[in-house]
Amino acid sequence: MAEKKKAGKSSKSARKAQSPAKKSPATKKRSARSALATATSASKPVDERIQAMTEAPLAVCAEDESLQKMLNVLRNREEPIEVRLAALQSLQAASFAVLAFESCRADYIATLRELVEDPDPELRQRVLGILARENDGFVQKKLLEGLKKPGKALVPPEKALQLLSYDVHSEAYPIAREIVKNPPSSEAKREALRLLSADPAAVPVFEKILRDKDELAELRQLSASALNSLRPEKLQEHAREIVLDKNEYDDIQAVSLTALTTLGDEAEVTGDAELLKRVDALKGEKSTKVKKSARRFLEKYGE
Amino acid sequence: MKVELQINNSTSTGARFVGWTPSPCRIRMTDRSGATSLTVNVQITARTTTTGGAVVFRRGTTGTFSTSITVPVPITGASVPFFIAGRFGRPSINNGDVTIEARVGTTLVGSVRCMVRVRKNANQLTPGERDRFVAALAQLNNQGLGRFTDFRDMHTNVSSPQAHGAPGFLPWHRAYLLDLERELQAIDPSVSLPYWRFDQPAPNIFTRDFLGVSDSLGTVQFSPTNPLQFWRTDGVQGINRRPFFNTGTGAPSLRTEAQTLAIGTTYSAFRSMEGNPHGSAHVSFGGFISSIGTAARDPLFFLLHCNVDRLWAKWQRVNGRFDPALAASYDNTPSPVGHNLPDTMWPWNGITGGTRPPTAPGGAMASSPSATAPGPQPRVRDSLDYQGIVNLISRLGFDYDDVQFA
């Protein structure tokens, strides 16, 4: 979906506007009802409305009228975007009080679904995130559709993959594999790999990346970790090979040493003379990361 | 001549941890050679380093503390009680950085090393404290295969009514944190849960060596030496967290500590902090932490809640609200099951079905070598008197660096 710019402040400046330490006169104590009245009044200054919204999130559900007013602010594209984002945050905060929020939940979720195609990219992304974390089937379908047909995408592919990883379904795997093969960006490839880290059939994908010294260190790190999770019995083997490889990159060696220190099989590691000797030598490496991880390894296993 | 020093009434090394709350201790003679009378006066003091913890002593449950006490110890081997507490403002940095010494005259007749272990501001941890915490947490998670899975499964949309939106919000989370902390301490006893003081900038928390740095997408990045890079929940690698404030210089926009403590002097009023600052802190990010069902997938969740609990502890101290029998200490309006003072709390009670969730992950509350409360199936009321101020036996075995005893 094309990202339309709304008149007024952009989402970025809206985010900035929500930074703390903005102590308006409205910070003085007032009742929850009065705070809500200020928050939903279009005639009040924006800063004051935002401040009021942070004051009493639980009061949103005190009366049906309050909830509807807040939802109207959120829906209304004529409202300043920073006010709409603050309304969303206030409703989110209120949703943490599950029992109190129960009567509001249905209207809240229905409103969020109305907003998945909102022209403001920041609001859209936040709404999609909330619904994705609720394992919302409607949103999952939209995200998958956007990955298959980029013209219909609500968010960039890396974001869609990240949101789909909240509740991984096997239908997402084929498109994620495709993105790993032909990534539109390195972030998309990384997020596709993260999603695939739940797929036991993806082991060969991770093995290939791990062995490929031309891959980004971040992706190899992720692959090593994913492989260790998908095949826990392989942790020792993979990490050991990397540590023993004198031509391996520092970052990957540090990752492997950290894996062995934190998650390794103590009996197996302490009985591995070749590995211990190699790590002892790594103590003197130039790389701070390798030295640090070697030192921690030896504190646990070697001394 | 030799004596045995029992910290927290135990000879176990796992029990040699104290906070600001007085720990019950005992001393008894194990070798009476050289004794010339039926009792021997033993002086108990402590030795520490310049940066180490400091402790104080007293003979009974009341009275002032001092840096040294003299205890008449019978030569029969019968033990004599006394109390040790950390000196407020002087927590330990490393396990065993305080040595308790027993002397007869100038002769050392017994010693044990211990630690003043309290929950600290995560932004001020030493690199060593930070690394030990992170390593223990990563080990508990064990790439999604470890005991952490139970903690993740305790805090979901399904179980949420047991813990949110009613008076039991604070007691339930106190028990939840304690359970997790005890599991961490089973891995590394020097670890305590740090808190994220969310009303102040905390740049040292959001680093690659600690809880990670979020990229523009909200994917959290770690240094190659940080074991949290292997963090895995719900079968998926990594953590999503997108801050809506500058984590390097700023803090979320929410009630400050002073404003929170001023909410009101009754628990019924104070518990509105569940919305602000608690809820506000959660939603100052996008990602896992901003929704109830996924919040516990982010390690930051536990630091956030540790601060929520600390605020309650501070409020309790300011207002004297430790006694469950005092109306202002709790909201006694009849509430859903799990939120009333006498109710047992899920999942530790193992009750499933009906008004409780369908499963009870994790089993009973973890035990601790240094505190007997709250027992395997804590009730709501067991969370209140966490320092054992009303009843010594109720102490839960944790303290906050800036919340004094009594």
Image: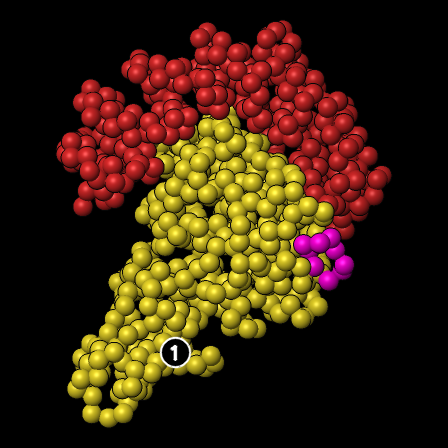
Chain colours: A red, B yellow
Q: Residue at x 51, y 37 (%)?
A: B298
Q: Which residues are magenta?
A: B332-340
When the figure is inspected, residue B76 is found, relative to residue B324, above or below; the finding is below
Nearer-the-camera pick, A48 or B404: B404
Left or right of A134? Residue A182 is left
Magenta stretch, overall SS: loop
Left or right of B235? Residue B41 is left
Could you say where residue A143 lies in the image, as x and y percent from the top left?
62, 16
Name the residue carrying label 1.
B82
When the figure is inspected, residue B247 is found, relative to residue B172, above or below; the finding is above
Q: Residue at x 75, y 32 (%)?
A: A108
Considering the numbered disc 1 on the image, is that residue within a helix, a strand or a loop?
strand
When the figure is inspected, residue B148 is found, relative to residue B101, above or below; the finding is above
Could you say where residue A154 lies in the image, as x and y percent from the top left?
63, 15
Q: Residue at x 64, y 27 (%)?
A: A135
Q: In this rendering, does residue B400 appear at all?
A: yes
Q: Residue at x 39, y 32 (%)?
A: B229
Nearer-the-camera pick, B137 or B85: B137
Nearer-the-camera pick, B234 or B240: B234
